[in-house]
Structure formats: structure tokens, C-alpha cells
């Protein structure tokens, strides 16, 4: 999970911190984690993020940070995976399954199934559902595979560029 960012004319002499927070919209909290784990490189070398960049520099941000998700018990379940790439997982959630573990659904939520799946593919990441559906609602649920992509989806939801459409099927007539 990497982003490669080539420095062009309009970004020369700006600090790496500025580019990461302004151009790539990386939160300060995530930026601090990336710095602590030495996941930011300039021209394939560790860098001080207070440094400025030059024309043609290659900024590399690696989001492969091991995270603890031991608060969720992995439970084997059949996941209906509609799409998956290195950044996120899209599932078709059946009705009757909650998204998050709770007192009544401690081991049988969709997050428990995703935790089992992530463990089986060797992905040590927190379980991050991007959107939610009610217990009795079926539909598409997105799980972010890293903090950065979750932040991107949250920003899209806040500014209205993330769109959802709902289809309701009704059996019989509804009385008004």
C-alpha cells in the first residue's frame, strides 16, 4: 500500500509535511504514525518531513503499518466479496448480520468475518467499515484496509462526492 508522488513545478520548495497534509490530505495523526515508522521516503531515502522538496523528487508513502485488531474475535463465515484491491474490500452484507460486534453479537458480526479473512491473507490491520447498514438491511459495505483510505472515504462522504443509492423491495401493498 504505497503512494508515489512526483514533485512538479507547482510544489517545489514546499515542505514534505505541507505536501502530505495539504496535497494528499493525510491527517496529522496518521502523518505522525508514518514518521514514527519511517514510512516516508524521498528519492528512496529516509527523510526529515520538515525538509523541502525539489523539482523531480519522488515522494513515497508506505501505509504498510502493522496494526492491532485483537479486540475483534475472528469468525469464519462465507463473505460475499464483490470487489477487493490492496486498499479496500467491498462486501454484500446479508440481512440479519450486524456490521460491528456488540454484546448480543460478539462473534457473529460482519467485522468478525472480515477479521478472520484478514488473518487468513496475512493482513494485520484494524477492521474499518467505511459505511454501515442496519442489522436487518442487506447491501454493500466497504471495509478500508488502511487508515489513509478510510480517511479518503470519510472526506468524500463529508463533501458529498461519495454517493449511495438505495433500492427498497416491498412485498404486498403499503397502507398509508
Image (cartoon, rainbow, N blue to C red):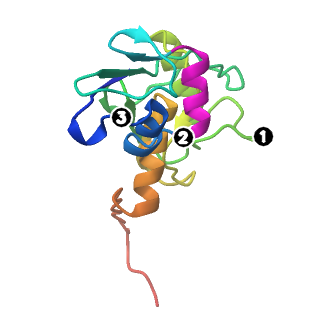
> In x, y percent, where is residue 139?
40, 49
Q: Is residue 147 left or right of residue 161?
A: right
Question: Disc number at residue 13?
Answer: 3
Q: Which residue is mark 2?
A: 27
Q: Earlier in the sequence, mark 3 or mark 2?
A: 3
At 34% from the left edge and 23% from the top edge, which residue is drawn?
59
On screen, 175 above or below 6? below
Q: Is residue 169 left or right of residue 77?
A: left
Q: Earlier in the sequence, mark 1 or mark 3?
A: 3
Towards the viewer: 113 or 159: 159
SS state under label 1: loop
Question: Disc number at residue 103?
Answer: 1
Residue 165, visible in the rendered structure: yes
Alpha-carbon neighbours of circle 2 within 10 Å: few (<14), some, or many (≥20)?
A: some
Magenta span = 27-38
Between marks 1 and 3 in the image, the one whose residue lies nearer the viewer = 3
User: What distance separates the C-alpha of mark 2 from that of mark 1?
Assistant: 32 Å
Amino acid at each position: 500500500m504505497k503512494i508515489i508522488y512526483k514533485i512538479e513545478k507547482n510544489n517545489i520548495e514546499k515542505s514534505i509535511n505541507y505536501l502530505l497534509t495539504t496535497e494528499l490530505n493525510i491527517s496529522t495523526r496518521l502523518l505522525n504514525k508514518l514518521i514514527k515508522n519511517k514510512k516516508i521516503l524521498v528519492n528512496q531515502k529516509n527523510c526529515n518531513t520538515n525538509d523541502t522538496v525539489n523539482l523531480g523528487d519522488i515522494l513515497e508513502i508506505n501505509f504498510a503499518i502493522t496494526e492491532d485488531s485483537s479486540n475483534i474475535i475472528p469468525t469464519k463465515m462465507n463473505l460475499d466479496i464483490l470487489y477487493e484491491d490492496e486498499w479496500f474490500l467491498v462486501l454484500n452484507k446479508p440481512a440479519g448480520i450486524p456490521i460491528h460486534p456488540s454484546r448480543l453479537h460478539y462473534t457473529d458480526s460482519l467485522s468478525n468475518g472480515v477479521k478472520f479473512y484478514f488473518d487468513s491473507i496475512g493482513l494485520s490491520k484494524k477492521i474499518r467499515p467505511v459505511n454501515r447498514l442496519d442489522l436487518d438491511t442487506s447491501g454493500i459495505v466497504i471495509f478500508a484496509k488502511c487508515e489513509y483510505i478510510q480517511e479518503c472515504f470519510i472526506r468524500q462522504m463529508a463533501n458529498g462526492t461519495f454517493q449511495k443509492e438505495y433500492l427498497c423491495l416491498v412485498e404486498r401493498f403499503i397502507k398509508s
